[in-house]
Image (cartoon, rainbow, N blue to C red):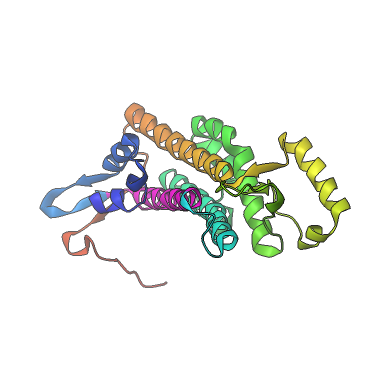
Amino acid sequence: MSLLVGQSFGPKYGYKPIVYRDLANQLVHDVENGAMKISPAIEHLANAYEKLGFIMYARGEVGNLDTRTNYYDIIIKYHLYNVIFYCKAFLDAVSNTISSALNIKMRKPANIDLSKKKFIEEIACKMPELEEELRNFCVWIDYVTEFRMKLIHRQRIFFLHKELPIHRSQPEMFREPIDPILFFDKVMLDALDKKLAEKYGSSKIYVGDFCQQQLEKAKALFETVILAFKRKIEKEGADWLPWKTVTPEHIGKPVFTKRA
C-alpha cells in the first residue's frame, strides 16, 4: 500500500490528504495465504495522485524561478505548459478511477473523459450523487481540455513583457492561448483583450496565480471524488466495487495476460 499511496510529489509540498489514504486502504484487503483482494480503481486513484503531484511540482518551479536565470521566459513557459498538460492527465486519471470503480464501459475508450457528455450521463445513472457534485467542476474541466487542445495544435501562451517589473517572478499572460499572428497585429490583439475581459472579468493573469488556480481546482476535484466514494462505501459497503485477487507471487510484479 505504501508504494501506491506514496508515489507523488504531494508530500513534498505538504499535501497528504488523510481521505486519500483512508479510501486507498478501503480498496485493498489482505486475504488468506498472503494474497490480496484489490479493486482496480486503486491503480487509477494512485495515478491521479501522482499527476496531481506533477502539477504541484510545476507550480513550485514557477514560483521559485529567479528572473535573472538564463532563458527565464522559456523555462517558465515550459513549467506553465506542464501545468496544463498534467491537469489534463490528472483529469484522465480521475475519469479512469470513476470508470473503474463504477464499472462503466464505453464503446470508445476515448469517451471515458469527464469532458464528454456520454460519460457524465453514465456516471449519473450509476452514482447520481457524484454526478451532481461534478457539475461544480464542468467549467474548469472544459477550460483545461480546450486550453490543452489549443496548445498542442497551433496556439501559444503569450506573455506581456512590457508589464513585467524587474523584481517580479511572475509575468502576466493572456487567459487563453492565442494564434501566433496576433503577436504582430495590435488591432486583433486589442480585440482579443476585450473579448477575454468580457469572458473572465480580466483578460490577463499572473502566471503564478494562474498555476495556483489550476492546482486548487485539481485538489478540490480529487477530494470531491474521494469523499463521494468513501460515503458510498460507508453507506452500502464495498460489494458494488469490482475486485480482483492478486496472489503472493504476483504482488509487486507486473501481471501480463495474453491477447485474445
Identify the magenta region.
38-63
**In the rendered image, the vertical position of residue 84 relative to residue 195, given as above or below:** below
Q: Nearer the viewer, residue 23 or 83?
A: 83
**In the rendered image, the vertical position of residue 200 relative to residue 75, given as above or below:** above
Q: Residue at x 26, y 41 (%)?
A: 25
Q: Quadrant of residue 18?
A: top left
Q: Nearer the viewer, residue 63 or 198?
A: 63
Q: Residue at x 51, y 51 (%)?
A: 62
Looking at the image, can residue 199 be seen? yes
**In the rendered image, the vertical position of residue 226 relative to residue 67, given as above or below:** above
For residue 99, side relative to residue 141 (left or right): left
Q: Main secondary structure of the magenta part?
A: helix
Magenta region includes residue 48: yes
Q: Quadrant of residue 256?
A: bottom left
Q: Quadrant of residue 258?
A: bottom left
Q: Residue at x 58, y 53 (%)?
A: 111
Q: Position of residue 173 (x, y in %)?
A: 66, 49
Q: Position of residue 13 (x, y in %)?
A: 37, 44
Q: Residue furthest top?
A: 235
Q: Residue furthest front?
A: 166
Q: Residue furthest right?
A: 187
Magenta region includes residue 136: no
Q: Nearer the viewer, residue 215 or 185?
A: 185
Looking at the image, can residue 116 be seen? no
Q: Residue at x 65, y 59 (%)?
A: 151
